[in-house]
Image: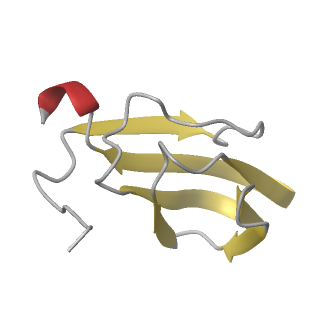
């Protein structure tokens, strides 16, 4: 009942490597999760969630979903290669 899934993904962000510093996405909608997809040719990477003290390994093509406005998070590239990040999110002003 607490998960509001629509309207989904009113915005898309594409970045190189992703943010390697912990941050919160203040402009995301607080009840609609964001989806992060790792792309590129890299050995491995991680999405880190500070409050949960969790680190999730991601390979190219893997994705995860998170409450990016509520959880401090960052991305880490481990080893070599090129990593792009595709983020699908809902901007809070559009809902």
How many numbered discs sit on the rendered protein?
0
State left or right for residue 71 relative to residue 48. Answer: left
Q: Is residue 13 above or below residue 51?
A: above
Residue 25: x %, y % from top left? 50, 35
Q: Is residue 90 above or below residue 37?
A: above
What residue is shown at x 17% (from left), y 53% (from top)? 8
> Is 36 in front, or is 17?
36
> Is 76 in front, or is 91?
91
What residue is shown at x 47% (from left), y 30% (from top)? 26
State left or right for residue 93 relative to residue 50. Answer: left
State left or right for residue 41 relative to residue 6. Answer: right
State left or right for residue 70 relative to residue 23. Answer: left
> Is 63 in front, or is 65?
65
**Is the C terminus in the top left, top right, bottom left or bottom right quadrant?**
top left
Residue 9: x %, y % from top left? 22, 48
Residue 30: x %, y % from top left? 35, 45
What residue is shown at x 79% (from left), y 55% (from top)? 77
Q: Is residue 10 above or below residue 45?
A: above
């Amino acid at each position: 009942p607490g998960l509001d899934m629509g309207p989904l993904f009113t915005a898309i962000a594409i970045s190189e490597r992703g943010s390697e510093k912990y941050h919160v996405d203040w402009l995301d909608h607080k009840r609609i999760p964001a989806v992060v997809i790792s792309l590129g040719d890299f050995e491995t990477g991680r999405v880190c969630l500070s409050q949960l003290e969790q680190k999730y390994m991601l390979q190219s093509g893997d994705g995860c979903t998170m409450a990016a406005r509520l959880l401090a998070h960052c991305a880490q590239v481990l080893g070599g290669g090129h990593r792009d990040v595709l983020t699908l999110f809902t901007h809070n002003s559009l809902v």
